Every structure is written in C-alpha cells, then in structure tokens.
Image (cartoon, rainbow, N blue to C red):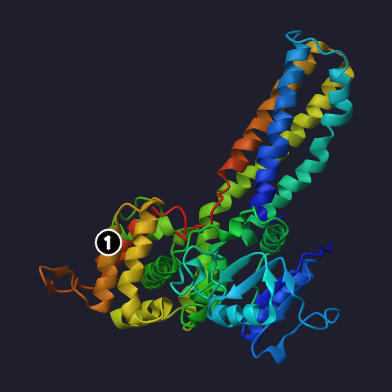
C-alpha cells in the first residue's frame, strides 16, 4: 500500500530518525528524514530540493526551535505537527497544548508498530483525526522495574529455600510461601526451575538481591537519577491508583527504604523504613492488584 | 492487525454476530419467527464460517503467549537500558511465571474450540437426519458451545500484566 501524503521526520539523531523513516516507508507511507545541519537532510531521491508542503511533521522535541527557524527561512507549510521524545508524552520539554506521541521513543530499535504507522498516515490525511497514538497510555516504568525487582527477590529466595521441591498448597502458610505460590513459582516448568536453582549465574545471588544498595542502583537508573525517583514514584502511584492499586504506601515505603529516605514531616524527615523481606512482600502484594502496567 | 485487534475482531465482530444468527435460527426452527429460506441460507453460508474462524481462534490462543507476555516490557524503556535486569534468565523467569499463571486460560480457549468442533459435527449430522427435534437439540448444544467459546476468549487478558 502506498500513500502520497508527505510526512517529514525532524530529528537530529540520525539513527532514530532513520529508523522512523524506514518504518513509515516499510508500511508504504513515504516519508523524509530531515536533520540538521540541512545539508545532511535525507530526502527521498525523487524529491530533490526540500519540498515546501508537508501534511505531517514528526518532530523530536529538541529539534522544534530549529524547525521553526527553518519554516520561516524556507517558507515551509506544515499542516500538522506531532512531537515525540525518549520519555514519551510525559516529557516536560514538549510544547504545552501540542499533540505528542505518548510512547517513549528513545532507542534505535523498533519505534513504531504497524498500527502506529497506520494511525500516523491517517493523521496526515485528516487533520481532524485524533489517532490513539496521541492518547496517554499506561506508562508506569518505575513500577514495572520495582515489580520485576520484587519477583526477582522472591524467586531467588524461593530457589534458595524451596529449590525444586514441589510444595503443595496449604503445606506452609507463611506470607512468603503464599507469595511464591501467587507469583507462580510452583507452576514454572521443572526444567526452568532446575536451571534457576542449579546454575550459579542464572539469577543474581541472594546477597545481591537482599541489598538495598543494589535495588537503589536499579531504581535510580530506571528513573534517570536518584533525584527523579520519589517524584516519579508519586506520579506513577497516582496513575496506578486508578488502575487497581489499593496500597500505594507499601511501594512508597519500599522505595524510601532502599533510598534510605524518611518521610518529610513538619519540616523534618522521619527515619527511613527498614529494607527487609517484609517491606518487599508488602510492596509485592500491593503491586499484584495493579491491572495495567 | 495486532493481537488485541484480532481478539476484538473475533469476539465482538464475528462471534457476536454469529451468535445472533444462531439465536435467530433457533427461533425459526421453533416456529417463533417466520423467515422463509433462512435455514437453508444458514447451513449453506453462515455455518461453514466456523471452519475458517476456528483457525483464527486457535491462532489467537497460540499467539497469546508471544504477544501478551510481560517479557515485552524488557524491550521498552527503562528496562531495555538496565543490563542487570535484562538478563536472559530474568526475562525467562518473568515470562515463565506469567505463562504458569495464564496457561489455564489459554487451555480453556482451546478446549472450547474442540467442543465447538464436536457440536458443529453434531449439528451437520442432525440436519442430514431430517428430524426437527434432533436438529433443535443439536443447535442448542452448538449454541452453548459457542457461548462458552466467547466466555473463554473474554478471559484472555487484554492488558499485559506483570504480576
């Protein structure tokens, strides 16, 4: 399928811009990748000089000012602008009240699905069309990271304490045992369980996953820096509350425990919660209520 | 078409429509509704649709594992940039645990397809007997099997869940 609508991709990062262009082209929607300085523009061979009229421009947020200057200098006409960034629609640098793609597009791997390309083509064809790709999606990257850390912690403990044994339901009523069953430890294929238990490098060691510092390192990296963690967790917990999460305090406590940060109270911070199996289990139980991630 | 669209298309598009037609045929056979030629049309054109759609339903069940697994989270930010968590064994663990929690739901869809297959054969056989009461009974069984299939598809999660 081909479409004569013109889509301009404006991205100074060559790899990402080219991935986008290839993905749109691959779905039969010819597009051009424009990057700065202008003599590096990757235009389709048939286009020659930079065309003046475009149905849609996909603009990386950092290239907006340069595009604005170019529009004035070259008298470009762009019917519709859509912004994107590595952080998705939550990026504070994206001009307010502008349409933005609500998915993180920071990497150089596959950025757009076939459906995304179709939606963008329809957006190029019809200025009134409001494609779903522009709607905020569920985006809880830190909670995903914390959820995986909780599972990893429990799996390493299960591998150490239960190993490959088959423990039938009700044999052990501890909170930890209940969590092992809930996460599906006993449903894992025996081969997988055996490998996780027997191969030394299969999973991180018990010492590693029991270290708050190691957790903090992963969470800080996921948030793009320690200073972003607590604000980002607060945002995601508010989002998660609308998606089934009933006990956000347990997550907040876990994060404060690994960051060793107390809760601010009347100008002073309380002592940070302790990082231990109870803190992890409470957070895990809370996250299990979450219906969308 | 992605997995979710396929699921919606099958469940809300084709299957719902098919169930309406089945209900209508039941009324025609019961003489509650008069619709000359409908029975013939149903057996000639509508019923054989199952043969094509069953493959779509089976494909939906088969691709569920690859399309809706939380292992896809590791391809997205921020996990794709966290080498300590993006280890193959950790991805396998998250995927394996999820499969363990959802495999019964997928098995239910497959079982429902086999039941529809069986009642489909029963319905076509009953028609060849030319006995109205057998046809009505077979249609009732086929209808129930299709309803069970719809329930089973409904149980397939529409969001990717981690825990």
Q: Residue at x 57, y 67 (%)?
A: B72
In the picture provided, is B72 more to the left or to the right than B122?
A: left
Q: Position of residue B3 (x, y in %)?
A: 66, 54
Residue in front for this viewpoint, A160 or A139: A139
On the rendered image, what quadrant is the C terminus of chain B found in?
bottom left
The residue at 64%/31% (across/down) is B147
Q: Which residue is mark 1?
A: A250
Is B139 situated above or below B103? Answer: above
Q: Residue at x 41, y 56 (%)?
A: A181
Q: Does the image show residue A277?
A: no
In the depicted structure, whether residue A49 falls above or below residue B24: below
Identify the residue at horizontal 68%, vertical 31% (top origin): B145
Q: Chain of mark 1?
A: A
* Residue A82, image quadrant: bottom right
Q: Nearer the viewer, residue B38 or B47?
A: B38
The image shows residue B137 at horizontal and vertical percentages of: 73, 17
Q: Is residue A115 visible?
A: yes
Residue A130 in the image: above or below residue B151: below
Quadrant in which the N terminus of chain B is drawn: bottom right
Q: Secondary structure at mark 1?
A: helix
- Image position of A142 with respect to B44: above or below: below
Front position in the image: A36 or B18: A36
Q: Residues within 10 Å of mark 1 (few under 14, many from 20)?
A: many
* A8 left or right of A257 in image: right
């Amino acid at each position: 399928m081909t479409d004569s609508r013109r889509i301009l991709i404006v991205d100074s990062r060559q790899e990402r811009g080219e991935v986008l262009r290839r993905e749109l082209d691959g779905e039969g929607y010819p597009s051009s990748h424009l990057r700065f300085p202008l003599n590096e523009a990757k235009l389709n061979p048939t286009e020659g000089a930079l065309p003046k009229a475009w149905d849609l421009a996909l603009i990386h947020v950092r290239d907006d000012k340069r595009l604005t200057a170019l529009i004035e200098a070259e008298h470009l006409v762009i019917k519709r602008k859509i912004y994107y960034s590595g952080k998705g629609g939550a990026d504070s640098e994206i001009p307010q009240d502008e349409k933005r793609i609500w998915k993180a597009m920071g990497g150089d791997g596959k950025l757009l699905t076939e459906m995304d390309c179709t939606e963008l083509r329809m957006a190029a064809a019809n200025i009134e069309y409001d494609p779903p790709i522009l709607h905020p999606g569920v985006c809880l990257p830190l909670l995903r990271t914390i959820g995986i850390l909780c599972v990893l912690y429990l799996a390493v403990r299960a591998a150490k304490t239960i190993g490959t044994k088959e423990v039938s339901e009700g044999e052990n009523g501890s909170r930890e045992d209940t969590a092992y069953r809930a996460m599906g430890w006993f449903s894992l294929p025996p081969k997988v369980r055996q490998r996780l238990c027997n191969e030394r490098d299969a999973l991180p060691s018990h010492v590693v996953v029991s270290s708050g510092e190691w957790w903090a390192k992963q969470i800080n990296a996921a948030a793009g820096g320690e200073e972003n963690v607590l604000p980002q967790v607060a945002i995601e917990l508010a989002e998660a509350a609308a998606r089934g999460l009933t006990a956000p305090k347990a997550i907040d406590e876990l994060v404060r425990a690994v960051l060793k940060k107390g809760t601010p109270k009347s100008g002073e911070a309380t002592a940070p919660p302790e990082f231990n199996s109870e803190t992890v289990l409470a957070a895990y139980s809370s996250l299990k209520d979450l219906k969308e991630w | 078409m992605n997995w979710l669209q396929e699921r919606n298309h099958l469940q809300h598009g084709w299957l719902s429509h098919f169930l309406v037609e089945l209900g209508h045929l039941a009324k025609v056979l019961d003489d509650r509704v008069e619709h000359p030629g409908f029975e013939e049309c149903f057996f000639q054109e509508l019923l054989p649709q199952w043969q094509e759609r069953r493959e779509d339903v089976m494909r939906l069940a088969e691709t569920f594992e690859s399309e809706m697994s939380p292992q896809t989270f590791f391809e997205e930010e921020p996990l794709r940039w966290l080498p300590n968590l993006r280890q193959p064994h950790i991805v396998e663990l998250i995927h394996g645990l999820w499969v363990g929690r959802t495999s019964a739901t997928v098995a239910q869809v497959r079982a429902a397809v086999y039941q529809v297959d069986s009642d489909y054969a029963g319905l076509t056989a009953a028609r060849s007997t030319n006995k109205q009461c057998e046809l009505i009974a077979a249609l009732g069984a086929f209808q129930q099997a299709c309803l069970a299939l719809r329930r089973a598809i409904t149980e397939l999660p529409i969001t990717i869940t981690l825990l």
